[in-house]
């Protein structure tokens, strides 16, 4: 893989990972409700979960989807149901003090597993494999996954820190409820361009 291709991949990965989507909106909500350190497993889960998705798609999982197009429809339905559930959980999250004491942010394995029903992750992964991995073999695929993971770090850190900074202003229950409700609505809204790109 040439330096030009790697540079283009890195830039594409950085820009795409920074744009609002289910992962980033949930990280922001988690940062606001639980703080940076308690959100760290969530951040790592996103990074490694997406790497595993990218590797398996590149190793041939995409052929299964091509052979059985119904899987795309099933994935859309499952993604929609699960993301609506997550939006509900965000909208009804407890006040910061209560959440810190009793609530649980998304774990590493929950965040990693979420990538498999995250429509933005699938769209991102399929684009990367199609555009930036022109040659077969594990080495270029692994290199691609590592570059994407490294370029995702600024995104997960920035969105979590933004959420943590927001917590300074979420000192009342009313403001927290408004913030969480807004995050939930944005999470649902982020689905439409991905699930229904022609609408």
Image (cartoon, grey):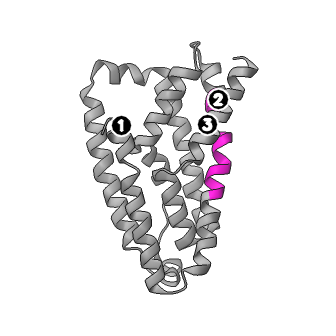
In the picture, the quarter occupied by the N terminus is top right
Q: CA distance from mark 3 to mark 1?
A: 20 Å
Magenta stretch encompasses residue 61: no
Q: Is residue 145 left or right of residue 53?
A: right
Q: Mark 1 or mark 3, which is nearer the start of the sequence? A: 3
Q: Is residue 109 visible in this depiction of the protein?
A: no
Q: Which residue, given by chain and number where applicable, does mark 1 sit on? A: 197
Q: Which segment did they paint magenta?
A: 144-158
Circle 3 residues within 10 Å: few <14, some 14–19, many ≥20: many
x then y, percent, for residue 93? 41, 74
x then y, percent, for residue 110? 45, 53
Image quadrant assignment for residue 31: bottom right
Q: Residue furthest front?
A: 199
Circle 1 residues within 10 Å: few <14, some 14–19, many ≥20: few
Q: Residue furthest top?
A: 135
Task: Tally the numbered discs.
Answer: 3
Q: Which residue, given by chain and number where applicable, does mark 3 sit on? A: 13
Residue 116, compared with residue 70, is above or below; it is: below
SS for callout 1: loop
Q: Which residue, given by chain and number where applicable, does mark 2 sit on? A: 9
Q: Nearer the viewer, mark 2 or mark 1?
A: 1
Q: Main secondary structure of the magenta part?
A: helix
Which residue sits at x=63%, y=66%? 36
Label 3 with label 2: CB-CB less than 8 Å? yes
SS for callout 2: helix
């Amino acid at each position: 893989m040439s330096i030009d291709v790697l540079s283009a991949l890195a830039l594409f990965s950085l820009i795409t990972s920074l744009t609002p989507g289910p992962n980033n909106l949930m990280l922001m909500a988690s940062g606001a409700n639980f703080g940076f350190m308690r959100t760290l497993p969530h951040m790592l889960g996103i990074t490694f979960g997406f790497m595993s998705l990218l590797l398996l798609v590149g190793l041939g999982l995409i052929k299964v989807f091509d052979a059985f197009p119904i899987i795309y429809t099933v994935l859309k339905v499952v993604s929609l149901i699960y993301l609506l559930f997550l939006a509900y959980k965000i909208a009804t999250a407890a006040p910061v003090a209560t959440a810190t004491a009793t609530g649980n942010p998304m774990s590493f394995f929950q965040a990693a597993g979420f990538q498999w029903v995250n429509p933005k992750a699938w769209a991102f992964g399929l684009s990367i494999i199609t555009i930036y991995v022109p040659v077969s073999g594990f080495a270029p695929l692994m290199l691609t996954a590592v570059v994407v993971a490294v370029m995702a770090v600024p995104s997960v850190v920035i969105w979590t820190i933004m959420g943590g900074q927001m917590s300074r202003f979420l000192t009342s229950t009313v403001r927290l409820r408004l913030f969480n409700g807004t995050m939930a609505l944005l999470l649902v809204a982020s689905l439409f361009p991905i699930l229904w790109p022609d609408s």
